[in-house]
């Protein structure tokens, strides 16, 4: 069918699919590799001020790495899913404001670098771009890894919560190491307090329950199985934060990153075939 015969939304979705398919390796491997290099260079003071931790470069890189997930999920975003994503976006801002003001549920922390425009001078405007894809990636990964067991709520939901929290065991030590944020009292786990992970269990539980209710799992799984690039953002996650953790000698987070990489490899998501 010619593209002109498709509804506008379908044409946009097809073009986005084509864009990601044609640039998979660049998006999922080159961008996170360059991101890791520039973040490490910024942390070591090797870049000039206009480039060091440039918030717009950071946000652009993150947005590009999110493209496979956005393209993959876009055809499945119904009104119900939109409402769920909107509610989670609001929750993300709300819980972060509470955290900044009270120190709960993540511990007392402050941002160490500029992460772009701020809401009320306290919370990055791009926060949902950081948090929601992380949860969705964990959800999709678990659907494939668990197979038939993912049909059972009592298995699926706790497994995704564990996967989300596990991803923060990778992300937070690396983010602290490069100076994205710092915890006032430090922490036993590479400068991260255990309270932070209690907060992540709370937020992961809320997010997973909402996503589980908002999306049609059968359609999601069907799209996931047909769309080879849908978990490429997870590939980027493994490369970006794995490299940074290795560079700082954060061996437990680095090993966890490798674990996620092995899971992706076992479900054939570390492949980049030519079109």
Image (cartoon, rainbow, N blue to C red):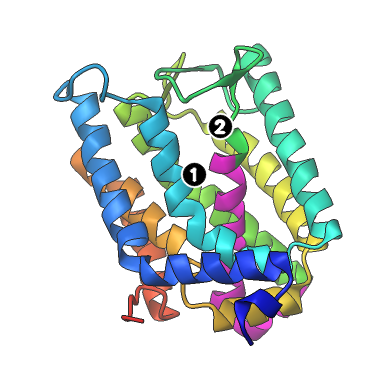
Crowdedness near tag 1: few (<14), some (14–19) or many (≥20) residues, C-alpha within 10 Å? some
Q: Tag 1 or tag 2, which sits nearer the N-term?
A: 1
Can you say which quadrant of the picture contains the N terminus? bottom right
What residue does disc 2 label?
A: 196
Q: Which stretch is magenta?
A: 129-152
- Residue 130 on the magenta span: yes
Gap between marks 2 and 1, in whole Å? 9 Å
Name the residue nearer the viewer: 272 or 205: 272
| Residue at 71% from the left image edge and 48% from the top image edge | 207
Please give the label number shown on residue 238. none
Snapshot quadrant of residue 159: bottom right
What residue does disc 1 label?
A: 168
| Residue at 43% from the left image edge and 50% from the top image edge | 64
Question: In the image, is 253 to the left or to the right of 51?
Answer: right
| Residue at 65% from the left image edge and 26% from the top image edge | 96
Q: Examine the rendered structure and indicate whether residue 51 appears above or below residue 135.
A: above
- Residue 177 on the magenta span: no
Whether residue 244 can be seen here: no
Whether residue 216 can be seen here: yes
Residue 91's x, y, as percent?
75, 35
Residue 257's x, y, as percent?
36, 55
Question: In the image, is 233 to the left or to the right of 161?
Answer: left
Can you say which quadrant of the picture contains the C terminus? bottom left
In this rendering, which labeled residue sits more in front, label 2 or label 1? 1
Q: Examine the rendered structure and indicate whether residue 230 appears above or below residue 225.
A: above
Crowdedness near tag 2: few (<14), some (14–19) or many (≥20) residues, C-alpha within 10 Å? many
């Amino acid at each position: 069918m010619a593209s002109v015969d498709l509804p506008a939304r379908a044409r946009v979705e097809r073009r986005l699919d084509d864009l990601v398919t044609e640039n998979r390796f660049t998006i999922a491997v080159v961008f996170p590799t360059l991101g890791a290099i520039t973040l490490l260079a910024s942390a070591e003071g090797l870049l000039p001020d206009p480039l060091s931790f440039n918030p717009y470069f950071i946000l652009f890189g993150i947005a590009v790495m999110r493209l496979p997930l956005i393209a993959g999920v876009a055809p499945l975003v119904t009104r119900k899913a939109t409402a769920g994503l909107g509610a989670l976006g609001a929750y993300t801002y709300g819980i972060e404001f509470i955290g900044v003001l009270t120190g709960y549920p993540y511990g007392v922390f402050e941002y160490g670098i500029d992460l772009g425009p701020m809401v009320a001078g306290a919370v990055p405007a791009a926060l949902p771009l950081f948090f929601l894809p992380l949860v969705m990636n964990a959800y999709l990964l678990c659907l494939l890894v668990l197979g038939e067991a993912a049909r059972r709520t009592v298995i699926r939901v706790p497994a995704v919560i564990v996967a989300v929290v596990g991803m923060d065991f990778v992300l937070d030590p690396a983010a602290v190491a490069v100076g994205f944020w710092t915890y006032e009292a430090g922490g036993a786990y590479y400068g991260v307090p255990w309270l932070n992970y209690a907060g992540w269990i709370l937020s992961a539980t809320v997010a997973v329950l909402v996503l589980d209710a908002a999306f049609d799992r059968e359609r999601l799984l069907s799209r996931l199985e047909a769309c080879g690039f849908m978990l490429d953002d997870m590939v980027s996650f493994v490369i970006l934060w794995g490299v940074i953790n290795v560079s700082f000698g954060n061996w437990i987070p680095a090993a966890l990153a490798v674990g996620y990489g092995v899971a992706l490899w076992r479900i054939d998501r570390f492949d980049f075939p030519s079109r």
